[in-house]
Image: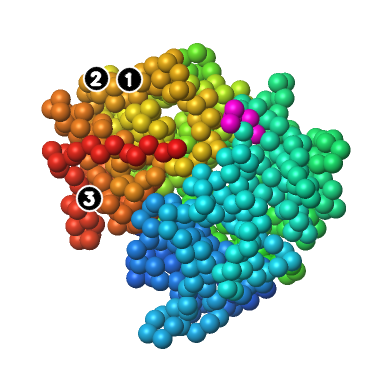
Amino acid sequence: MKTNLLICLLLLVAVVACQTQKPRLEQPQVIDRALLFDNPEIAGGQLSPNGQFISFIKPYKGTLNIWVKKLEEDFSAAKPVTSDTLRPIRVYFWSRDGKYILYSQDKGGDENFNIYAVNPQEPPVPGKDIPLNRDLTNLKGVRVYIYSIPFGDPDAIYIGLNDRDKSWHDLYKLKISTGERSLIRQNSDKDRITGWIFDWNDQLRLANRSNADGSNDILRVDPKELVKIYTTSVFEEAGPIAFSKDNKKVYMTTNKGDSIDLSRLILFDPQTLNEEIVESDPLKRVDIGNVFISEISKEIIYTSYEDEYSRIYWKDKAFEDDYKLIKKELPNSDIHFSSSTTDEKFWLLSASADVDPGSTYLWDRNKKKLTFQYRPRPNIPLNDLAQMKPIQYKSSDGLKIPAFLTLPKGVEPKNLPLIVFPHGGPWARDGWGYNAMAQFLANRGYAVLSPNFRSSTGYGKKFLNAGNNQWGDKMQDDLTWGVKYLIGEGIADPKKIGIMGGSYGGYATLAGVAFTPDVYACGVSIVGPSNLLTLLNSIPPYWEAGRKIFHVRMGDPTNAEGKAQLERQSPLNSAGKIKAALMVVQGANDPRVNKAESDQIVIALRDRGFPVEYIVAPDEGHGFARPVNNMAMFAAAEKFLAKHLGGRFQESMKPDEAKRLGEITVDVKTVKLVPATPKK
């Protein structure tokens, strides 16, 4: 009797234990990095102006090129219209009449872009798969800007060329059909024009000027002169968006004024100089974001704000009704309108989320019909992706830092290896949504912190200016205190902290391992400057207009105090303190952060006998564009991170990627410093 009772009690305890036990967490499969970083299957869709065709980006012989199909055809019926096998095409657009597709392309990442045109309805050139592609500008060592696509002359675009003076772009009207150029306005160090604004009738009305002291002017283009009508200081920003329907006033975003913090939308009269406030953030949290204007009604359709999540405020009731219908069909997605027909009856839109890289749909406004078109990355296992959530923490001086945290799925969020991934710029920002890098790292088992440190844009003038002269100082504190916050929350393992980023994020990586050597176990610096003095001395000549802004926001190398500050903030000068494992990645043709920036830090570590891994792609610039280079680099990086932080990594590599990794991996013993040629 007692034995039976004891058995019953033991069974009861077991049942209760099973009922109260937490569900077992299971980490998802290792996602093949090719699904995240290799060529998308289809991307960048655009409708032709008349709605008869859809163009898109798709691999052609392994490289992203432009394809075209009839709207009603299946995507398998599409034909390529470009065939670049050296470098992917990423930026293109249709001419106003839909006769041509125009695209820009550089050589090996040197950022000297030329403009090309192709008529997609022409037959292929004999012996080739594509119609004739014409280089409309055909200039070497010249960077072409596109200023305007006129409404009234579909065979023209307005462009800027710096062939005469590398620092400044002259304004030309370019005839698409022939490549003929007509000079409209010359530009020089005396003029310092950085942009031109046309009205709805294609009349040149305004210009932007960058002054030598860092202030900026908006100029009215009168028949005989340029008249200054609006000025912002070096610590303020203003920019025209579009003219009002009657062409008398212009919509502008601005944060001008000592009492003004957040950028707002105004309507400004270039003749009377009167301005009226149209809108600022109703929640008083962030700068105004997108102002979406119809080219038919010439009225605002909506405004949006990028906060913890995106917010939209509708001005056009019919469009708002359409949006509500779309949201009913795609309730869990962020919706972004990307391309329309000239009559705005058909729209392409993308629907995405933090755990969904997105789909593209066609919206028929007349029939109120939503039709699926394609998924850029259809094979990503959506159920294995990790959620991104907004967080906030205080930095060393109490400033609240907005950030986003992605935690690995299927793992208890305690004592995790952490990777801090600061964005580039630094005058940019991270936002909520699908982030391939965050998903890649989270899938490997890391918590990922994406901090919008001071100097990040979108959070007001005070937050932006709080980063002035703070590279490596309080801007770095904003990262360090994020690490402390996550350690304090029990999320991050203090012995397994890594840092990784590109451009400014690469600098922050070097600064992190040099200035806070006890915080990080390893770092991966991608095209990151190591010496702020040599960086500022070698900026591209077409950045001349922003030189003073660099000096104000980073530090002024022309005076002793500024030079000393920049020397102190240069990780190269603290290379002797580095004790975290380091990988350095560089593009040999980078015009922004010259290869010498990476060579310097690699040599400094090598010469003190400290191991450092070095990857240099000879056919890349500021960041890698070719998938084979990206895939090789990410394969090396994830193995490096796993070695020092203990995360998972994918051991397999495709033969061409393994071969490429061998080609771009540098024996640090052979590295010799070739200083960048100082620019004007």
User: Which residue is rendered at x = 34% and y = 28% of the image?
Assistant: 531
Q: Secondary structure at mark 3?
A: helix
Q: Position of residue 352 (x, y in %)?
A: 54, 52
Looking at the rendered structure, the kind of residue marked 2 is Lys
Circle number at residue 505: none
Q: Which residue is pictured at 63% across the width and 59% down the height?
A: 183
Give the labeled residue for mark 2: 577
Q: Which residue: 86% across, 38% down?
A: 272
Residue topped by disc 1: 515
Q: Are marks 1 and 2 in contact (CB under 8 Å)?
A: yes
State whether residue 155 appears in this view: yes
Q: Is residue 573 above or below residue 85?
A: above
Q: Which residues are magenta?
A: 212-216
Secondary structure of the residue carrying tag 2 is: helix
Residue 275 in percent (x, y) is at 82, 35
Q: Main secondary structure of the magenta part?
A: loop
Q: Is residue 329 visible?
A: no
Numbered circle sitting on residue 664: 3
